Image: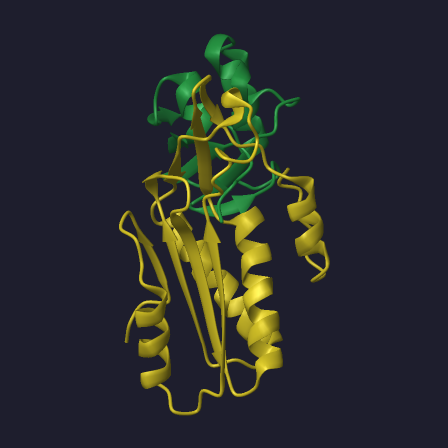
Amino acid sequence: MQPHVVIQTEDFNVAEVLTAMRASDLRVGAICTFVGTVRDTRMLTGQAMDEVVSMTLEHYPGMTESAIEAMIEEAHQRFDFYQAKVIHRVGELKPADQIVLVAVTSAHRGESFKACEFLMDYLKTQAPFWKKEQTPDGAKWVDARVSDDKALARWGIKSSNA
Amino acid sequence: MKLRLRYFASLRESLGKSQEDLTTDAKTVGELRDQLLAHGGAYLCLARDKAVRMALNQVMVAEDAPLTDNAELAFFPPVTGG
């Protein structure tokens, strides 16, 4: 069986992942996906110093995988879905690159929608990744957002990450 | 007891190292943090007014978590993945 959690430097192909998830389970009637990407602000802001030229993602090998596996286990306790797959890239990323994929299969749409959002909310505040943005003005670690803690609180889980 | 400390992201940069091994009589994660802070200098990046998260044997913990021999204790800033 393929691992549920993959941390990799390479890009991923969403269509291939979804095809494989469906092919391996004929019960699937719904598949919900979230793809997080690097925003390309260079054409929008007009403020050269804010332009993100590239982004470097660091993580805690071992803990990252086990933490996300535990999140998937927690999601299984809450929602009636078949399979969840999380692919998260690390290393250097450029504007418009894909960062993360969360894909969830279920019989009907409701459970996979909920599980997908739950997993992303959880991941944002509890998985050990750190982003560093490279701009023309220098490098800067990205600040955690209080809104992400609030997003997880909607599921009844207290987070004080930010 | 013996511990392996690991530092990530901005804390790794502030301390200039990603890990170190030490022997301590600290009983909890918080006591160990106090001992590191007592060194001053770069260790002040672990000060209580800074946002620092901790993981013991790769699970997020609070400062009252008891230390165990040969544990891996990690310090890092708030996470920003996804």
* Residue A123 percent location from the top left of the image: 52, 53
Q: List the single residue furthest toward the bottom.
A: A26
Can residue B24 be seen here? The reply is no
Image chain in green? B
Q: Is residue A1 above or below residue A144?
A: below
Identify the residue at horizontal 62%, vertical 23% (top origin): B50
Identify the residue at horizontal 64%, vertical 47% (top origin): A148
* Residue B33 percent location from the top left of the image: 54, 25
Quadrant in which the N terminus of chain A appears: bottom left
Identify the residue at horizontal 49%, vertical 41% (top origin): B55
Q: List the single residue furthest toward the top.
A: B41
Quadrant in which the C terminus of chain A appears: top right
Residue B29 in which image quadrant: top right
Can residue A108 be seen here? The reply is yes
Closer-to-camera residue (A23/A160) = A23
Closer-to-camera residue (A82/A31) = A31
Whether residue B80 sits left or right of residue A86 in the image: it is right
* Residue A11 percent location from the top left of the image: 30, 53
Q: Is residue A102 above or below residue B61?
A: below
Image chain in yellow? A
Closer-to-camera residue (A80/B65) = A80
